[in-house]
Image (cartoon, rainbow, N blue to C red):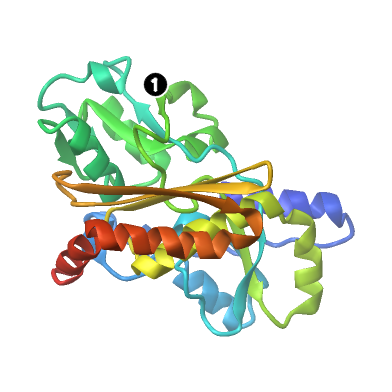
Amino acid sequence: MWQAEHVAGRLRAAYPDSEMKLIRMTTRGDKILDAPLAKVGGKGLFVKELEQGMLDGYADIAVHSMKDVPVELPEGLHLAAILPRESPRDAFVSNRFASFEDLPERARIGTSSLRRQCQIIAKRPNSTIVSLRGNVNTRLSKLDRGEYDAIVLAVAGLQRLGFSDRITQELDEGESLPAIGQGAIGVECRRDDESINERLAVLHDETTSLCIAAERAMNERLQGGCQVPIAGFAELTNGRIRLRGLVGQPDGSEIIRGEIEGPVHSAERLGKALADDLLQHGAGRILRALYATV
């Protein structure tokens, strides 16, 4: 809802004579809170219902966290705008320990992300990963009740909701490589709606879009979803894109990492090339084994 209000506010500022109406919807990913996302299965857990609303004509746009958007979109829909990216990093949040390094042996760490899980266990093999679902307030409340020694959330989500003071430590990309699209907001609409597409153009940030394109191209080649531990993060500097990616075993026993750099106009090609490199160095074997069990 914060993201939807943010986009509506930006559009109101750009088009003060336009009327904005927020249509509240609940997705399957919002409803199923008693199981880790990897166990729920399927792609688009947080977007399918919103997309159907646009296809049915009772909504004009949908606002998404880019990390939730599948690579393949329904026919007739597309991403018309990607807003400037906020922090892509993960946040270590704890009431008892000042940093990730200060956690004791067998610390209980809350997350339902296999991406976070594999990187946490790789660094702290004796940690206990405990499923953590619900909105940000719910997750923080569970931490405050003592159910976890620490939890890991997205920095951007905490900052947007006014919980910056709860961030104990920002984990840099070397400690926890972000999810593909993390920190970025995307706006989806009907491809043939010229009026809406024209209005959404004011929101679009080309730098973020190019970085997200590289990340999503890598994910597409890897056929990634929430059931597998995949991470990817691209940065654009001086006309060149640097993309880092990884594929890991959920238990952290093996993590395949890679990196590639190239000109900005080759964003998608770079993403596919890095995916191929990861696959050749063992990611293919890991993914085949994981997909065989879901």
Front residue (pair 15, 182): 182
Residue lying at 26% horizontally and 19% vertically, measured from the top left? 101
Front residue (pair 40, 124): 124
Residue lying at 23% horizontally and 54% vertically, measured from the top left? 36
Q: Is residue 163 above or below residue 182?
A: above
Q: Quadrant of residue 196?
A: bottom right
Q: Is residue 180 above or below residue 280?
A: above
Residue at the far right: name it: 17
User: Which residue carries the number 1 mark?
Assistant: 168
Q: Secondary structure at mark 1?
A: loop
Q: Is residue 194 above or below residue 209?
A: below
Residue lying at 42% horizontally and 35% vertically, measured from the top left? 173
For this view, does 260 lie left or right of residue 148? right
For this view, does 202 lie left or right of residue 76? right
Residue 172 at what x, y percent from top left? 42, 30
Q: Quadrant of residue 154?
A: top left
**Amino acid bearing label 1:** Thr
Residue lying at 34% horizontally and 64% vertically, measured from the top left? 225
Q: Quadrant of residue 104?
A: top left
